[in-house]
């Protein structure tokens, strides 16, 4: 009896397997070859099928028809505060010196209906403030208005948007970037870069180092290393290369050492990478026709531009409390390395003493390292005309 049941079970399994094989053969007969679409016209030239090419293709939007801008895009293109910058394609850069992390794609789509987009985003030009203000101006959330433009999106989509961004005086921007890197070093967030690039500035012209930076009144802000360091542990990169002083000569010596690192190693952080280089590699510029290049404004025009956009989109403007205000930094016991451009110029013209010479040296190095920014952006930097590179 058991053997009969076993025999019936085997017969049933065999029949099922036979049906499965027939079905499989039928599927194979009608299935398309995995990488061949030659017989399907609308798939013949699709580069995204089966990993044919990556979305980082170098095709230029400028080679394709560009749709007419939306009404607000047209209005923005006629805004009186647009800056005239040089043709970025005429600039040459030493790519081997651009070793810091780059902002790619550095674009923020914020209004898909009006086809307006904020970008390129350039570090230390108010990019964080711009994103926050645009959200407030349009009453937008991150999800529905500020989705970062995906690398996988087809490039044709870029041509549908009017891009706009902000820049600032190149010398002021560099000094803000220098301040940012010093903060990173102070909080021990720059240890990897120091080791990777063999940087030297941090151990020269030693200034008093704050044990913590404060954020808000009375609130301490410490790095992970500071929070988790034992009492006997030491900093990985303390400044011991000179006597600790807090005077102008030491501050200027440290700035010069920082500039020397850039000249020797390259632009090792995105906060000090030339504005023009970051613009020149950005997709909004490289993939747009000459007629539809992104609009560039000065950081001081940010409130006016965003108010203009908000007025067109919502009929309202930003409240005074929401508007951007210029961040003012001054060298004190917490941030002794801070040097403003106006202060640096004043030091350079103060006479023939050591501080004046150090300030003049720093300005000459800045003019050389950021020559493309000085030549290309519409800012008056007469100090650079005194040097042979100009």
Image (tube, rainbow, N blue to C red):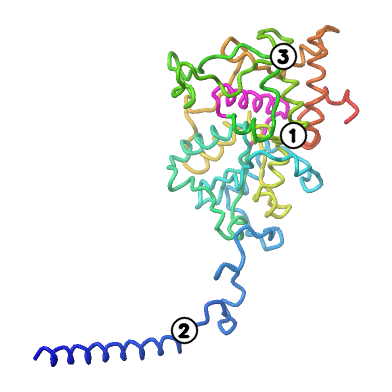
Position of residue 289 relative to residue 80, above or below, is: below
Q: Which residue is mark 1?
A: 265
Position of residue 364 relative to residue 116, above or below, is: above
Which is in the foreground here, disc 3 or disc 2? Answer: 2
Is 177 colored magenta in this rendering? yes
For the residues labelled 1 and 2, the Cα–Cα distance comes to 56 Å
Q: Which residues are magenta?
A: 166-189
Q: Quadrant of the C terminus?
A: top right
Q: Secondary structure at mark 3?
A: helix
**Position in image of residue 50 (x %, y %):** 55, 70
Q: Which residue is mark 2?
A: 31
For the residues labelled 3 and 2, the Cα–Cα distance comes to 73 Å
**Position in image of residue 374 (x %, y %):** 78, 32
Is residue 8 or residue 149 the one in the foreground? Answer: 8
Q: Which residue is mark 3?
A: 343
Instruction: Decide if residue 383 is on the left or right side of residue 320.
Output: right
For the residues labelled 3 and 1, the Cα–Cα distance comes to 27 Å
- Residue at coordinates 66% horizontally, 32% vertically from top-left? 298
Q: Residues within 10 Å of mark 1 (few under 14, many from 20)?
A: some
Q: Residues within 10 Å of mark 3 (few under 14, many from 20)?
A: few
- Residue at coordinates 64% horizontally, 32% vertically from top-left? 195
Tags 3 and 1 touching, CB below 8 Å: no
Q: Residues within 10 Å of mark 2 (few under 14, many from 20)?
A: few
Q: Quadrant of the N terminus?
A: bottom left
Q: Looking at the rendering, which quadrant does residue 193 occupy?
A: top right
Instruction: Decide if residue 302 is on the left or right side of residue 258.
Output: left
**Position in image of residue 59 (x %, y %):** 68, 61
Is residue 351 or residue 378 the one in the foreground? Answer: 351
Q: Secondary structure at mark 1?
A: helix
Which is in the foreground here, disc 1 or disc 2? Answer: 1
**Magenta part, dominant SS:** helix
């Amino acid at each position: 009896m058991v053997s009969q049941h076993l025999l019936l079970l085997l017969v049933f399994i065999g029949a099922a397997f036979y049906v499965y094989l027939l079905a499989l053969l039928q599927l194979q007969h009608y299935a398309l070859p995995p990488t061949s679409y030659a017989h399907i016209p609308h798939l013949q030239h699709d580069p995204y099928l089966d990993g044919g090419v990556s979305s980082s293709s170098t095709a230029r939007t400028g080679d394709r028809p560009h749709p007419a801008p939306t009404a607000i895009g047209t209005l923005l293109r006629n805004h009186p505060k647009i800056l005239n910058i040089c043709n970025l394609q005429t600039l040459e850069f030493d790519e081997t010196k651009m070793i810091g992390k780059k902002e790619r794609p550095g674009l923020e789509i914020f209004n898909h209906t009006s086809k307006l987009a904020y970008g390129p985003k350039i570090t230390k030009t108010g990019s964080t403030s711009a994103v926050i203000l645009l959200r407030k101006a349009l009453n937008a959330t991150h999800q529905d208005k500020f989705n970062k433009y995906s690398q996988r999106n087809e490039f044709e989509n870029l041509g549908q948007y009017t891009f706009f961004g902000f820049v600032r005086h190149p010398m002021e921007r560099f000094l803000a970037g220098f301040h940012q890197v010093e903060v990173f070093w102070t909080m021990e967030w720059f240890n990897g870069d120091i080791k990777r690039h063999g940087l030297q500035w941090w151990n020269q012209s030693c200034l008093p180092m704050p044990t913590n930076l404060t954020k808000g009144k009375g609130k301490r802000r410490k790095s992970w290393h500071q929070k988790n360091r034992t009492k006997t542990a030491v900093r990985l990169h303390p400044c011991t290369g000179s006597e600790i002083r807090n005077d102008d000569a030491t501050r200027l010596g440290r700035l010069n050492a920082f500039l020397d690192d850039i000249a020797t190693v390259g632009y090792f952080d995105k906060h000090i990478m030339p504005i023009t280089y970051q613009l020149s590699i950005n997709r909004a510029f490289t993939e747009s026709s000459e007629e539809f290049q992104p609009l560039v404004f000065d950081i001081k025009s940010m409130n006016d531009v965003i108010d203009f956009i908000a007025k067109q989109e919502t009929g309202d403007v930003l409240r005074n409390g929401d508007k951007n205000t210029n961040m003012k930094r001054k060298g004190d016991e917490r941030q002794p390395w801070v040097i403003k451009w106006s202060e640096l110029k004043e030091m350079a013209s103060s006479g023939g003493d050591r501080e004046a010479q150090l300030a003049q040296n720093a300005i000459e190095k800045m003019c050389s390292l950021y020559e493309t920014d000085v030549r290309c952006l519409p800012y008056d930097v007469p100090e650079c005309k005194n040097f042979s590179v100009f």
